[in-house]
Image (cartoon, rainbow, N blue to C red):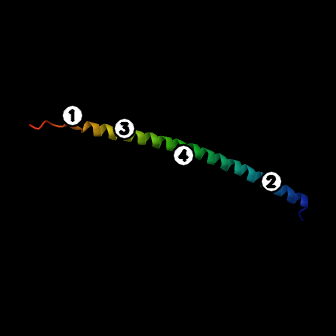
């Protein structure tokens, strides 16, 4: 027979375990959000670099780099 006191102790232990697990999961979410933010920043940087490269290549293929008509 379990007493009410034993049941309370068991519930407290379960609650303590759940609190610990909740804190651990919360830390995982925080770490993942930081990683997502870094990846988003890297992606934006790469987009800017791609746009800069495309703009530069379009300028290079302009009239100043065309062969003269006698070629």
Q: In front: mark 4 or mark 1?
A: 1
Q: In 3D space, how far apart are the residues under numbered discs 4 and 1 (Cα atoms)?
A: 43 Å
The answer to whether mark 3 and mark 2 are in CB contact below 8 A is: no
The answer to whether mark 4 and mark 1 are in CB contact below 8 A is: no
Residue 51 picture location, percent across and down: 37, 41
Which residue is more in the foreground, 35 or 60? Answer: 60
- Residue at mark 2: 13
The answer to whether mark 3 and mark 1 are in CB contact below 8 A is: no
Q: In 3D space, how far apart are the residues under numbered discs 2 and 1 (Cα atoms)?
A: 78 Å
**What SS does tag 1 mark?**
helix
Residue 20 picture location, percent across and down: 73, 49
Which residue is more in the foreground, 12 or 39? Answer: 39
Is 20 placed left or right of 57 in the picture? right
Q: Earlier in the sequence, mark 4 or mark 3?
A: 4
Q: In front: mark 2 or mark 1?
A: 1
Q: In 3D space, how far apart are the residues under numbered discs 3 and 2 (Cα atoms)?
A: 59 Å
Q: Earlier in the sequence, mark 3 or mark 1?
A: 3
Q: In front: mark 3 or mark 2?
A: 3
Q: In 3D space, how far apart are the residues under numbered discs 4 and 3 (Cα atoms)?
A: 24 Å
Residue 19 picture location, percent across and down: 75, 51
Task: Check the picture and name the quadrant holding the N terminus.
Answer: bottom right
Q: Earlier in the sequence, mark 2 or mark 1?
A: 2
Asked whether residue 71 appears in the rendered view, the answer is: no
- Residue at mark 1: 64
The answer to whether mark 4 and mark 3 are in CB contact below 8 A is: no
- Residue at mark 4: 36
Asked whether residue 66 appears in the rendered view, the answer is: yes
Q: In 3D space, how far apart are the residues under numbered discs 3 and 1 (Cα atoms)?
A: 19 Å
């Amino acid at each position: 027979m379990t007493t009410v006191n034993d049941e309370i102790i068991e519930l407290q232990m379960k609650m303590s375990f759940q609190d610990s697990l909740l804190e651990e999961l919360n830390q995982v979410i925080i770490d993942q959000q930081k990683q997502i933010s870094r990846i988003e920043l890297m992606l934006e940087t790469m987009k800017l670099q791609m746009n800069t490269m495309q703009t530069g290549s379009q300028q290079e293929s302009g009239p100043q780099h065309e062969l003269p008509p006698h070629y």
